[in-house]
Image (tube, helix red, strand yellow):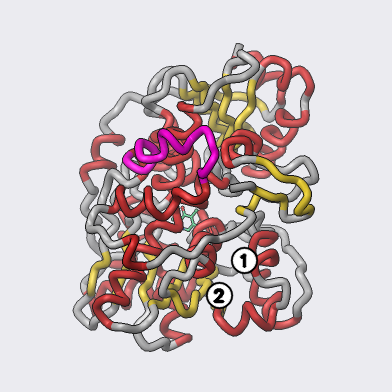
């Protein structure tokens, strides 16, 4: 299977190349040239790893990673992804049972496993560079912890991540370096971009991006939508609907891709926080990215979602998108009220991101949607605990991370300072 750029279908490379390169040279995002339909019977299995392997095989045909694909699926699907049914019948797809308690563990683990197998053509040391405002960095750090030959540098804004988030960035093996940068998340992102464009950096390192545009993160995310929708169909004989907390659109695009593969998925709801550029687009057809706004659901604070080009690629006409998708935006007030309401009425504790999905359903009133829960509430205890007036039980994975010693390097927001600390 070839991968094409969203901006130019003549740019064609293999899956492995798309994983190493990240962004296409023309600035577009890589997409598979086709979404091959698979007969549902051919996917029948109770084992998520085998299921993932069957679902993803066509994307790695003729690719170097075909041989090792099963191993990557094993790494990515090493924890449960259950659908929890609440006391009112509401279904919740819980994607937070991985090592860092967020859905990003799935994609990050597939990515690290794939990269560890890819031959290093030019003998330069590999460096994974990530800017993070919270969850991405933790998932990537944890995923690469077992691969000492791959250096990882995580940049996060000093004083702007929570204590527990910082611990998830700073507690790993020596090859994972956490940089506490004087500045904002945008400064961190700027440094990463500068490094990728810098000749000196590129002559010294093989730089690898681990952000949510990576196809190695998106492809495995299709698996939980495909598997959940098939199980739902088997039981109910109707197509499943998902409502997905959305920021950079990485998680949601995977659901749209799974639908495109012919999985029994009907509508896909996009639950947004106050960063609602997508809603304006669905109404007006004009795409106008906005500056990011800070909200309680901070992993979704994205005013200009990078994966939007992939959505436009799937649905060039917004009328077609609107037929199968709706977006709802929640204010911080809505998020707080929803956390309280869901706890009080259903005795279920949710994180601020997951709250946007519950809020969206209260507006959309779909018949029987599956709400996607993207993180464990214990990661956001400073927000959740005062609202429900009780401590959130810490899951064992997080408990383990919190007990590890941590290390960080404080630097000014400059590429030279970063460079000095990497050599
Ligand atoms: C990253 C993240 C999101 C947003 O996912 P996107 O793929 O960026 O749309 C939502 N919730 C949590 C907890 C996250 O970490």
Which residues are drawn in magenta?
60-74
Residue 396 visible in rendering: yes
Q: Nearer the viewer, residue 45 or 120?
A: 45
Which of the two residues, 142 or 23, is positioned nearer the viewer here? 23
- Return the residue found at the far top: 423
Task: Decide whether residue 61 is among the magenta residues.
Answer: yes
Q: Mark 2 vs ligand 1: CB under 8 Å? A: no
Eyeballing the image, is 149 above or below 59? above
The residue tagged with tag 1: helix, strand or loop?
loop
Residue at the image point whose x is 21% and y is 43% from the top: 396
User: 87 left or right of 116?
Assistant: left
The residue lying at 80 percent from left, 45 percent from top is 26
Determine which residue is flagged by label 1. 275
Q: Identify which residue is drawn at 50% across, 31% down.
A: 115
Q: Is residue 79 above or below residue 296?
A: above
Mark 2–mark 1 Cα distance, whole angstroms, equals: 8 Å
Residue 406 position in % (x across, y down): 38, 25
The image shows residue 49 at horizontal and vertical percentages of 30, 48
Occupied quadrant, residue 186: top right
The tag on residue 329 is 2
The answer to whether residue 386 of the structure is visible from this angle is no
- Label for residue 372? none
At mark 2, the secondary structure is strand
- Residue 235 x, y percent position in the rendering: 24, 78
């Amino acid at each position: 299977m070839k991968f094409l750029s969203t901006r130019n279908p003549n740019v064609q490379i293999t899956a492995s190349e798309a994983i190493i390169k990240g962004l296409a040279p023309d600035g577009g995002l890589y997409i598979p040239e086709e979404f091959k339909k698979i007969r549902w019977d051919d996917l029948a299995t109770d084992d998520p790893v085998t299921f993932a392997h069957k679902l993803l095989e066509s994307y790695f045909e003729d690719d170097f990673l075909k041989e090792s694909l099963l191993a990557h699926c094993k790494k990515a699907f090493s924890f449960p992804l259950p659908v929890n049914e609440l006391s009112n019948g509401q279904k919740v797809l819980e994607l937070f049972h991985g090592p860092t308690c967020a859905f990003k563990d799935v994609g990050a683990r597939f990515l690290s496993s794939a990269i560890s197998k890819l031959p290093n053509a030019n003998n330069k040391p590999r460096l994974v560079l990530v800017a993070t405002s919270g969850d991405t960095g933790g998932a990537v750090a944890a995923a690469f912890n077992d691969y000492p030959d791959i250096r990882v540098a995580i940049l996060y804004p000093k004083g702007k991540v929570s204590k527990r988030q910082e611990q998830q960035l700073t507690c790993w093996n020596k090859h994972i370096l956490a940089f506490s940068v004087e500045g904002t998340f945008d400064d961190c992102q700027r440094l990463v971009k500068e490094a990728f464009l810098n000749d000196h950096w590129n002559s010294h390192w093989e730089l690898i991006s681990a952000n949510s545009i990576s196809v190695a993160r998106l492809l495995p995310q299709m698996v939980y939508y495909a598997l959940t929708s098939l199980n739902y169909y088997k039981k109910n004989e109707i197509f499943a609907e998902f409502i997905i907390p959305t920021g950079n659109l990485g998680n949601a695009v995977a659901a749209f891709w799974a639908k495109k593969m012919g999985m029994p998925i009907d509508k896909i709801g996009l639950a947004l926080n106050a960063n609602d550029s997508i809603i304006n687009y669905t109404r007006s057809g004009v795409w106008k990215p906005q500056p990011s706004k800070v909200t309680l659901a901070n992993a979704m604070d994205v005013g200009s979602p990078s994966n939007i080009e992939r959505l436009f690629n799937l649905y060039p006409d917004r009328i077609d998108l609107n037929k199968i998708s709706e977006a709802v935006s929640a204010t911080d007030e809505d998020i707080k009220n929803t956390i309280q309401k869901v706890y009080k009425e259903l005795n279920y504790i949710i994180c601020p991101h997951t709250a946007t999905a519950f809020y969206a359903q209260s507006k959309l009133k779909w018949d029987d949607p599956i709400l996607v829960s993207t993180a464990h509430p214990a990661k956001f205890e400073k927000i959740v605990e005062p609202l429900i007036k009780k401590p959130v039980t810490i899951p064992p994975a997080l408990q383990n991370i919190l007990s590890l010693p941590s290390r960080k390097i404080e630097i000014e927001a400059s590429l030279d300072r970063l460079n000095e600390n990497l050599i």
